[in-house]
Image (spheres, helix red, strand yellow):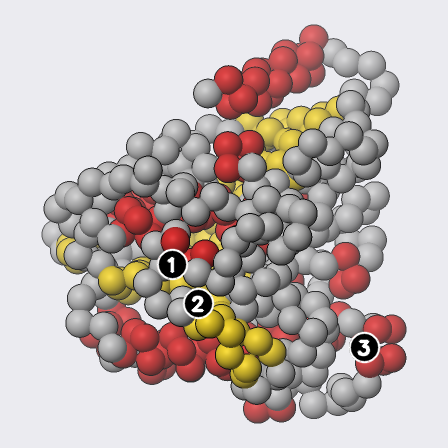
Amino acid sequence: MRTATKVTAAAVFLGPGIAIAEPNVLLIIADDMGLDASHCYDLGDQQAPMPNVEAMCAEGLVFDNAYAAPVCSPTRATIMTGQYGLRTGVGAPVAPVGTNGLDADTLSLFDVLANTDYSANLIGKWHLAGAGSDLNHPAELGVPDYFGLFRGTTRDYSNWTAVENGQEVQVDTYTTTAFTDRSIDWIGAQDEPWFLWLAHNAPHSPFHLPPADLHSFNDLVDDEDVIAENPLPYYQAMLEALDTEIGRLMGSMSEEDRDNTVVIFIGDNGSPNQVTPGFYGIHDAKGTIYEGGTHIPMVAWGAGISPGRSDAFVNTTDIFATIAEIAGASTDVSDSISFKPVLEGGEGDRDYIHVELFLEDDTSSSDIYGWAVRQDQMKLVSLQNGTEALYDLSVDATEQSDLLADGISDDEQEAVDSLRQIRADLEAQ
């Protein structure tokens, strides 16, 4: 049975002697956006123009060591529950048939916020309902007024089926615009502090040419064969369209509301492999537990945020405890460590990163399933097929040189033992 305890709302520090009680919180997720796509990190030369997010990076706090699961559903489950997939069972993209979704009896972030003064909602991509779940799955997990894309994706961004309060409805508005419209309406109707999880499905495939007023890629043609041959500029146009709508959403808010809002922007996993060929060397991006699949862009901006860059470790599980703490709620989920002190200019409490990708009862020899643990700059990748690799990210950021390939030193063995022990302790909890 899900339970949560109501406590007094916390205050967020805003400069010397200034505090904001009960700030609003806006969590924006870009679907399939890795570090390579963001000017906030400037890796390579294939970043999308996203002036609104770039302004947030310039004025807010950029996280250099934020990590997620390598695919959609597990990341969303970690945010919703504050738990790793090894506890929730959500280790791969969920599907309506044959794959478990998130158990509706799990204590959710929305259950926790229901015991505060906050109104809360989720608009956009859900992708947490598996076999046996019905269209009321968001409501069963505490989301009071869900509207969005219930499954993982859509074949057409401008002609799609939404779920609204447990019922299917047809929508002919571009998804990024539809989610923004609904968010503007919902925020405008609130008279209490609020939390909104805005889960865009852009720039997830299918790649396409967005509405012309949302991007600057005027030389692109709307042709499926051309897109298939070179999807990168279309992917970038989709991200720019997303950024344009973020700007419209922020512009719709009153100055008072903006001044009292914390914005957290993240990608949910690495970029699609169609737009990153060779970018991460011998490894792919999305769908792998290597850096290209799990090391994500993340920025916090707004009320009480100490600007700059942070090298603090953050797992997406930590968003659960952080938002709960901002809202004044107490949580007791061991996998979720609040990074609210980091937002205020302090130090983080997480000393390792843990990511995973798995199927229930999977016995395949695939080299994409497994887990990885990072502590300091050492990272151990343990694949489900039984192989392991050790990397020193301080000199090998894209994991090209496996330190275990040519024997192992005493220091490397010590690192392997320590990283294995972290995973063993998690499994034992």
- Residue 101's spot in the image, x, y percent? 55, 47
Task: Tell me the distance, in whole angstroms, between the alpha carbons under discs 1 and 3.
Answer: 38 Å
Name which residue lies at 46% across and 20% down.
429
Q: Earlier in the sequence, mark 1 or mark 3?
A: 1
Question: What amino acid type is highlighted by mark number 1?
Answer: Ala
Q: In this rendering, is residue 323 above or below 195?
A: above
* CB-based contact (under 8 Å), mark 2 and mark 1: yes
Task: Tell me the distance, in whole angstroms, between the alpha carbons under discs 2 and 3.
Answer: 35 Å
Question: What amino acid type is highlighted by mark number 2?
Answer: Gly
Task: Tell me the distance, in whole angstroms, between the alpha carbons under discs 2 and 1.
Answer: 8 Å
Q: In this rendering, is residue 223 above or below 334?
A: below
Helix, strand or loop at mark 2: loop
Along the viewing direction, whichever of 134 and 82 lies nearer the viewer: 134
- Residue 398's spot in the image, x, y percent? 72, 42
Q: In this rendering, is residue 154 above or below 81?
A: below
Name which residue lies at 43% across and 47% down.
104
Pointer 2: what residue?
Answer: 166
Question: What amino acid type is highlighted by mark number 3?
Answer: Ile
Answer with the quarter of the image where residue 235 lies: bottom right
* CB-based contact (under 8 Å), mark 2 and mark 3: no
Q: Earlier in the sequence, mark 2 or mark 1?
A: 1
